[in-house]
Amino acid sequence: MLPLRQYSKATIAMNRLVYCLLCIHYGLLGFCLALLAGACNGAFDAHSNANLRVYSTTQLRERPEESSSTVQHLPEGTALNDLGEVSPYFTGVYAGDSLLWEPWLRVRTLEGRTGWVFGGFVQPQEADGKDLLRWRHEKRLQALFGRANAQRLLSWHAQQVLTDSALAQHLREGLALRNTLQLALRHGLQRSAPEIRPTLNWLHPYLRYFRLLGHTIALDYNSLAQEVKQTKGEQDDDFVQYCLEIYPLDSMESPLPVWVFPLNVTESVSNLGAGHHWIALQRLDEVYRQAPLFQPELRRIKELLLDDILDSRRIYWQPLPKILAELDRMLQRPPACLSEQERTALTLRRQMFALGRARTNLRSGR
């Protein structure tokens, strides 16, 4: 028989061994049960990760178009995962008597089937009010001109501009974005009928000092004037003031600058001979000196003015003697902003006028 002291040590060692074995056994059992529970609850996890739901019964389609074959019927309330891909266009789809204009979204069902669903029939699980509108607008922007450009527009819209040099850069980026978006608007809308035109008023808040006129995006110099009041420096003030003088009708960048005679809201004839071209070029010299930050934009205005004189297809409102007199003034006292090549072009154009190779005096009605 073992002494009491030795027996106690052996018992303790055995108990420890048994305890360790039991821990390993139950640990493995718990791990297996956890795996089993995860498999059983897979559908719940997928559902909790779904970020979209169908709020109006629709179809999951193979391609982003109504005529595409159906992958799956989607009843109201169906949960979907947004895969982040948006069709590169809007489609007009009727919901009752309403025509909805939205892009298509690529999604995956909880059962793992992928396809395209019309964006007007789904929405984020938790979003409402402003969040829902923001989500819809971002999807539309992505459809119109891509995810990267959409993000550029949102960042540009939110940017704080504090100086005239920052505003010059901000304006330049805005003009580039405007041109890209303008092109996208021409090609990114699929109409169900030629006479149907979707409203794009939702774009206004993101355009800042640009304005949407139909499907044209124009620079609004009145809005830009409000921006420059908040900046340090005076170059942007001088530039905007000149632009307001160039576009006096409605202070909007348009086909109707001060040097034309408008026939209607979009068409005009040149008003060369009335003195506006000469005055605009003289002021351009001043603003070149006062606002060198905006030389690219000022050069663009000069190009528009010279095109109005030099375009051989242009028709002129004033009689020939007045036209020749204004051209002579430009050539005898040429503004510093005119290059030697531009002065030569004006000289040649004057010769064409003198030879009667332009249609003038439209105001006479003859």
Image (tube, helix red, strand yellow):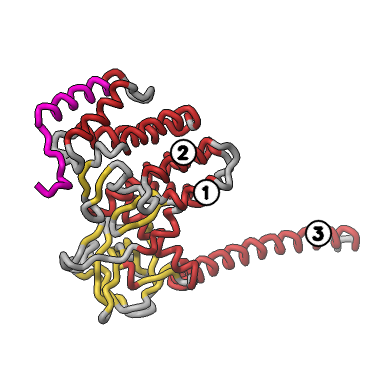
The magenta stretch is 342-366
User: Mark 1 or mark 2: which comes first in sequence?
Assistant: 1
Q: CA distance from mark 1 to mark 2?
A: 12 Å
Quarter of the figure with residue 109: bottom left
Q: Is residue 351 magenta?
A: yes
**Label 3 crowd (10 A; few <14 / some 14-19 / many >=20):** few
Q: Quadrant of the N terminus?
A: bottom right
User: Mark 3 or mark 1: which comes first in sequence?
Assistant: 3
User: Mark 2 or mark 3: which comes first in sequence?
Assistant: 3
**What type of secondary structure mainly makes up the magenta span?**
helix
Circle 1 SS class: helix
Relative side of 32 to 175, left or right: right
Query: x, y percentage for residue 115?
Result: 28, 63
Residue type highlighted by circle 3:
Ala
Q: CA distance from mark 3 to mark 1?
A: 88 Å
For the residue pair 304 and 262, the one nearer the viewer reads as 262
Residue type highlighted by circle 1:
Glu
For the residue pair 340 and 220, the one nearer the viewer reads as 340
Relative side of 92 to 41, left or right: left
Quarter of the figure with residue 78: bottom left
Disc 1 target residue: 227
Question: Residue visible at 40% across and 70% down?
Answer: 123
Asked if the residue under mark 2 is in contact with the one under mark 1, i.e. CB atoms within 8 Å, the reply is no
Query: x, y percentage for residue 158?
Result: 51, 51
Residue type highlighted by circle 2:
Phe
Query: x, y percentage for residue 142?
Result: 36, 55
Disc 2 target residue: 239
| Disc on res. 10 | 3
Question: Residue visible at 63% across and 61% down?
Answer: 24
Asked if the residue under mark 3 is in contact with the one under mark 2, i.e. CB atoms within 8 Å, the reply is no
